[in-house]
Image (tube, rainbow, N blue to C red):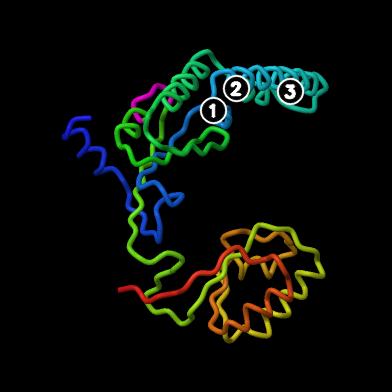
Amino acid sequence: MDTLSLTKLTQQFKLVVKDRLFYNRFEYAIGFYIDEASCLRDLGHEQIDDMIKRRIAWREIAQQRIVGNINSGLFGQQTIISRRNKDITEQTISDLHRLANLLLTTSADFKLVVSVNTAHVYANDLTLIEQINSLPGVSNQDYTRAVVCRPKDTIQLKYPRHQQRIYFKITKITDDQKKNLLNFLNNYSETIRLSPALQHWVKTPMVRTQDYFFIDYNEPSWLTMLSLVRPGLIRKTMQIIPAK
């Protein structure tokens, strides 16, 4: 990559202030849309073809069911039109193999994360980022760069009122366990701070916690008591420090 191209590419990156690099290894990331991206989860050409065959077969079965429901008057014609928009084309297959070939043959270290029709590649090599960016089928690119500016396992707040923060795990609890948890949190409502998402959750009947739920607190003994009320709920603990 020449200097001019490198400069233009780096200018597109949004800075993400963090306490560590992406996955503790990578400075840069590119997120993008590519049809059937999740076929790349097991990165390999044979794996792509096998997944494509299974998806085509499944969608043909699903389409037959839809047609049967339309003939029965259960669905309208728009349903079958929307199914056609999800056909897997030869171009889609070619685009997936091009991306897979690039990732399988590059000497650069990287991490690939895929979900449905989106993918993220984390790397330190900007040439790999630019090569991905130039591939056919890749669109809606989003570039981020990790900027490490605070110690690990810390959170910076402008006016911190607490010393520590804990994050929940994604887990499903029972109604009784949630009731006990809420009673415990209510008893300490004046000394802890619940994240906005957690504040909403406690007012709903939902019993699945999310990994972005957090609580700010001060006393180490409080954390010990929370662990007794609901063991295994805590994903990680971070120190809160004032922003400079």
Instruction: Tell me the residue at 39%/79% (across/down).
Output: 159
Q: Position of residue 107 (x, y in %)?
A: 37, 29
- Give yes or no for residue 134 being in the magenta stretch: yes
Instruction: Tell me the residue at 74%/23% (across/down).
Output: 62
Q: CA distance from mark 3 to mark 1?
A: 27 Å
Where disc 1 sits, the SS reads loop
Where disc 3 sits, the SS reads helix
Front tag of 3 and 1: 1
Q: Position of residue 63 (x, y in %)?
A: 72, 20
Q: Quadrant of the C terminus?
A: bottom left
Q: CA distance from mark 3 to mark 2?
A: 22 Å
Where disc 2 sits, the SS reads helix
Magenta-drawn segment: 133-137
Front one among 183 and 99: 99
What's under tag 3, amino acid-wise?
A: Ala
Q: Is residue 48 above or below residue 187?
A: above
Q: Can you name the residue that lies furthest to the top here?
A: 90
Q: Can you name the residue that lies furthest to the front here?
A: 107
Going from N to C along the chain, the mark reached first, 3 or 2, is: 2
Q: Residues within 10 Å of mark 1 (few under 14, many from 20)?
A: some
Q: Is residue 241 left or right of residue 169?
A: left
What's under tag 1, amino acid-wise?
A: Leu
Residue annotated with mark 2:
47
Q: Which mark is residue 43?
A: 1
Q: Position of residue 222 (x, y in %)?
A: 63, 82
Instruction: Tell me the residue at 42%/41% (across/down).
Output: 122
Residue annotated with mark 3:
62
Q: Is residue 154 left or right of residue 37?
A: left
> Magenta region, mostly helix, strand or loop?
loop
Do the residues under discs 1 and 2 have CB atoms within 8 angstroms? yes
